[in-house]
Image (cartoon, rainbow, N blue to C red):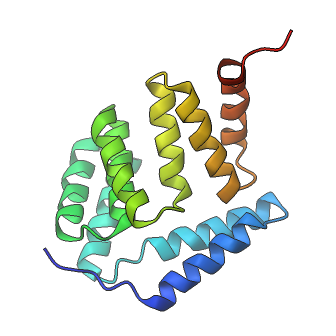
Amino acid sequence: MFSIPVSVAAQDRAGELLEELGAAESEAQAQRLEKALYLEWSKSGSAAMDLLLKRGQDALEVTDTASALDHLTALTDHAPEFAEGWHALALAYYQAEMFGPAMDALEHVLALNPQHFGALRGVAAVHEQLGNDTLAYDAYTQVLELRPFDEEVTEALERLAGRVQGIEI
């Protein structure tokens, strides 16, 4: 296992992007900021670890879950402090419908990066999948606080609202 040095400048840049994202005034602006933020989060500080992440993400895109799990497990074994590696691993587990391991990986992400809206969205999706509507609703609410203009999250909140808050008569 080796440690990946995450530069203070990269952490500062991600923090700035998160602040800008929270204050975004349009969906287009929010999408630009999210793309830049994911780019920052995807920098491990190691070419070898970046390659494992890329290979894992590429495998996920073509639904080669077994290969994705292999690459991303190797990544998190070698770089346990790299939050985006855990996030990609969580996506692979979710794709494989392995919700327990997905939630474990998401917890790693959030321990390393509590404002990772992708991981929060994953937590919400797992809770919704498992029928934990209140927990899903709470997590989706946190996502919207960090990431405005997410139509799918807004729809999820509307879908869950009646079950969580009850229906007024």
Q: Position of residue 9 (x, y in %)?
A: 50, 91
Location of the N terminus (image quadrant): bottom left
Query: As rendered, which of 138 and 100 lies closer to the eye?
Result: 138
Looking at the image, which residue is at 62% across and 50% down? 143
Q: Vertically, is 143 above or below 136?
A: below
Relative to 85, 159 lies left or right:
right
Looking at the image, which residue is at 44% across and 34% down? 126
Q: Position of residue 117 (x, y in %)?
A: 56, 56
Looking at the image, which residue is at 30% across and 62% down? 55
Looking at the image, which residue is at 23% across and 77% down? 48
Q: Vertically, is 136 above or below 58?
A: above
Q: Vertically, is 16 above or below 125?
A: below
Q: Residue furthest top?
A: 169
Residue 136: quadrant of the picture: top right
Query: As rendered, which of 58 and 79 lies closer to the eye?
Result: 79
Q: Position of residue 163 (x, y in %)?
A: 66, 18
Location of the C terminus (image quadrant): top right
Q: Residue furthest left?
A: 1
Asked if residue 9 can be seen in this view, the reply is yes
Q: Vertically, is 19 above or below 28?
A: below
Relative to 15, 157 lies left or right:
right
Query: As rendered, which of 115 and 33 lies closer to the eye?
Result: 115
